[in-house]
Amino acid sequence: MQFQVPQFIEAKAKIVGPLNFQQFVFFLIAGGISFAVYFLMPRAIFFLVFIFSFGIAAAFAFLKIEGRPLVTVIYNYFFFSLATKLYLWKKKEIIFAFKEKAPEKIELAEKKEELQLKIAEKSRLKKIRTKIELS
């Protein structure tokens, strides 16, 4: 009996409990910010900063948008927004029959008419097949 082995498995190693290294770093930064605010600001501000910083850390650590981590989505957003964009537009020359044509445009129109493919009336294979079948 054959078993299919899953391909393209993207699992990061768990370093600290259920968290991988990147998630742990997000929570470590949030804890560091909360620790600094605890000693520098009043308790009311500390609780607001604590909730806000750990909420942001949880979003960065666990939130995925269309299967991509939030960090990657934000990075791609800023990279696209700040990168230079090049838009190209090539104007096609249109020759109108009702306007007076310049001599150059007349020559181009004549060349285009000459270069057009001619469609054959019917395929000769049918005739050959019927001849072979009748013989």
Image (spheres, rainbow, N blue to C red):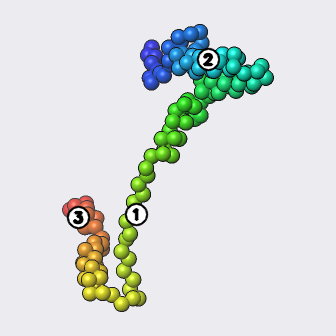
Q: Which residue is mark 1?
A: 89
Mark 1 vs mark 2: which is more N-terminal?
A: 2
| On-image quarter of the N terminus | top left
Whether residue 70 can be seen here: yes
Local crowd size for mark 3, using a 10 Å CA cut-off: few (<14), some (14–19), many (≥20) = few
- Farthest residue, direction front: 40
What residue sits 36% from the left and 80% below the top?
A: 95
Q: Quadrant of residue 116?
A: bottom left
Find numbered disc 1 in the image and state the secondary structure of the residue it sits on: loop
What residue sits 26% from the left and 87% below the top?
A: 103
Mark 2 vs mark 3: which is more N-terminal?
A: 2
Badge count: 3
Q: Which residue is mark 3?
A: 128
On screen, residue 74 above or below 90: above
In this rendering, the label closer to the viewer, 1 or 2: 2
The amino acid beneath tag 3 is Ile
* Residue 54, image x, y percentages: 67, 22
The reply, left or right, for residue 124 in relation to residue 88 is left
Mark 1 vs mark 3: which is more N-terminal?
A: 1
* Residue 121, image x, y percentages: 30, 74
The amino acid beneath tag 1 is Trp
In this rendering, the label closer to the viewer, 1 or 3: 1
Q: Which residue is mark 2?
A: 32
Local crowd size for mark 1, using a 10 Å CA cut-off: few (<14), some (14–19), many (≥20) = few
The amino acid beneath tag 2 is Gly
**Disc 2 to disc 3, C-alpha distance:** 88 Å
* Residue 10, image x, y percentages: 48, 22
**Disc 1 to disc 3, C-alpha distance:** 50 Å
The reply, left or right, for residue 95 in relation to residue 67 is left
